[in-house]
Image (tube, helix red, strand yellow):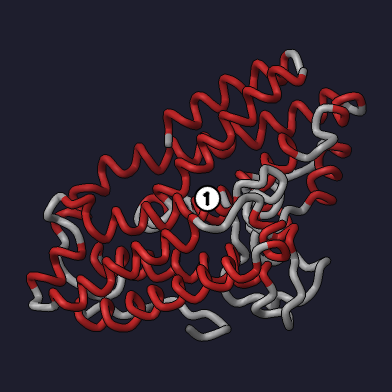
Amino acid sequence: MQQKMGALQTICEAYLAAPSQLTLSKLKLAYIAAHLQYEKIAAFQFGPAETQLLDIYANYSGGLDYDFSSVGELTGFSIDTINIENNIATGNYNLVGLTRNSFYSQGFPALNYLIFEPKALDRFAVNPAGRAKYIRDVVSRLKGLIDQVAGDWTTYRADFVSNTKTNVGSPIGNLVNQLAYQLDLIKGPRIGWPFGKQSGGIVFANKTEAYYAGISAALAVENLSALKELYTGASSGKGLSDYLVALNRAALNDEVTAQFDVSIAALQSIPDPMSAAFTTEPAKVEAAYKEVQKLLTLLKTDVASATGVQITFTDNDGD
């Protein structure tokens, strides 16, 4: 992740120094590479990442407990374009503030708008210095958070490895909770909410993750694939899957592993942009939603029970 952010920052500086279709195209590719990479570490939101509130500042999803029924509400993977443009115009903003306006105006969501919005290049004609400063500040802020977390993991690693308990806050407890939480995000903010599962079937296409880049489905696939790799330990013999086998729950492990594969395949069938697929391929979206829901139930109930882990987060729509 550090490498991807370093590359993104370098290419961003080249773009800001000479905004053009060519430099913007290169920046878009760097952004996509970094955002896809972020999905691979999304489940490690504990320890140093939790201390830095990495996921809140880097890729805010709105959590799991907000009403998702109004176009104007900042919910799910919304992007606060109004506040972003106001920040650029006034030069008065606080990216370390613990406010929803702050969360929705930085990180990958803000960069997604600033880089991929159809008029992104044209907007430099107005207040180019202010726009360049804001983009630079958002990238620098994101890179700084990643660098801090990566650095702190070198110390935290020893504590993570040595603690073999399963209580709240333990490494195993955190891993199982994050697996379930990330699946809840796929079921909710990534797919279910914008698809209309909490709004009477009304689609909110612009609230999909990375809406302007149009890579929502790819991000969801990357996220779920990374969760499977975490669960299986990348077939190293050291995954949670192996832990279940050691607990004489091999049948449950087989069921979970198979459901991972089914769910990933279902997500892969959804074409990008997912925002369009909500209306052009609703059957595929519905199928993926249901398969992820099955996987979530297995992780959140059966795996948590088998490993003696307490699920410590709640949502407002059940499983």
Q: Nearer the viewer, residue 1 or 30?
A: 30
Where is residue 192, by image quadrant? bottom right
State how many labels appear: 1
Specify the farthest residue to the right. 126
Left or right: 252, with 296 as reference point: left
Going by the image, does 105 lie left or right of 291?
A: right
The reply, left or right, for residue 127 in relation to residue 177 is right
Task: Identify the residue shown where x is 71% and y is 34%.
Answer: 115
Q: Residue at x 24, y 75 (%)?
A: 167
Q: Does 58 appear above or below 16? A: below
Number of other residues with Cα within 10 Å of mark 1, as a class: few under 14, some 14 to 19, many 20 or more: many
Observer-nearest of 132 and 275: 275
Q: Which residue is mark 1?
A: 219
x and y, in percent, of residue 280 in the image: 71, 62
Query: Residue 50, can we see it?
Result: no
Q: Kindly identify the residue that appears in the image at 46 percent across and 39 percent down.
A: 146
Quarter of the image with the N terminus is top left
- Where is residue 203, by image quadrant? bottom right
Q: Is residue 175 visible?
A: yes
Name the spot of residue 106 as percent of width and height, x first. 66, 45
The residue lying furthest to the bottom in this view is: 318
Residue 100: horizontal and vertical position, in percent?
A: 69, 60
Q: Is residue 128 above or below residue 86?
A: above
Tag 1 secondary structure: helix
Residue 27 location, quadrant: top right
Locate residue 86, reporting x and y percent. 86, 45
Query: The residue under label 1 is which amino acid type?
Result: Leu
Residue toward you, 284 or 307: 284
Residue at horizontal 49%, vertical 26%? Answer: 6
For the residue pair 305 and 160, the one nearer the viewer reads as: 305
